[in-house]
Image (tube, rainbow, N blue to C red):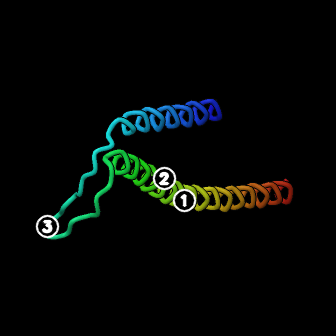
Amino acid sequence: MKMVKGLLFKLLAILVFFVALLAAADNSEEVSLSFLEYATPLWPISYWVLSAFVCGVLFSSMINTWTNTRLRFAARKANNLVKQANKGIDQVKADDGVKATNVG
């Protein structure tokens, strides 16, 4: 199921990319974006739309990778704690078994 979800997400992302590409292809008027005193060079609107889309995909992928890495390290640490606790429980059970045989 996880593989199907991943495949559907990738297909949806490709579909959105092509829709953005088609929508941007109609916008060929050159514009300059400005923020405070900085002004960008003249580019067609389609370049701005596609660059915003690509930057968004890259940024979200970077955040997703960072979050998944943190969660994987936390899961690994939790699994190690569980293994240590199980070893301790097994050791106590073994010690109780030895004491029971010595008493009887």
**Disc on the earlier residue, 2 or 1:** 2
**Disc on the earlier residue, 2 or 3:** 3
* Mark 2 touches mark 3? (CB < 8 Å): no
List x then y, in percent, for residue 19.
43, 32
List x then y, in percent, for residue 68.
52, 54
Instruction: Specify the amino acid type for callout 2.
Output: Ser
Q: Distance between the residues labelled 3 and 1?
A: 37 Å
Q: Could you say whether the residue bearing mark 1 is in a helix, strand or loop?
A: helix
Q: Quadrant of residue 72?
A: bottom right
Instruction: Specify the amino acid type for callout 1.
Output: Thr
From the image, tell me which residue sits under label 2: 61
Residue beneath the point at 48% across and 35% down: 18
Label 3: few (<14), some (14–19) or many (≥20) C-alpha neighbours in 10 Å? few
For residue 23, above or below residue 55:
above
* Mark 2 touches mark 1? (CB < 8 Å): no
Left-right relation of 32 to 74? left
Left-right relation of 102 to 82? right
List x then y, in percent, for residue 73.
57, 61
Rendered-image quadrant of the N terminus: top right
Q: Distance between the residues labelled 2 and 1?
A: 12 Å
From the image, tell me which residue sits under label 3: 36
Q: Could you say whether the residue bearing mark 2 is in a helix, strand or loop?
A: helix
From the image, tell me which residue sits under label 1: 69
State which mark lies toward you, 2 or 3: 3
Q: In the image, which disc is placed on residue 52?
A: none
Q: Outermost residue, left direction?
A: 36
Instruction: Specify the amino acid type for callout 3.
Output: Leu
List x then y, in percent, for residue 10.
56, 37
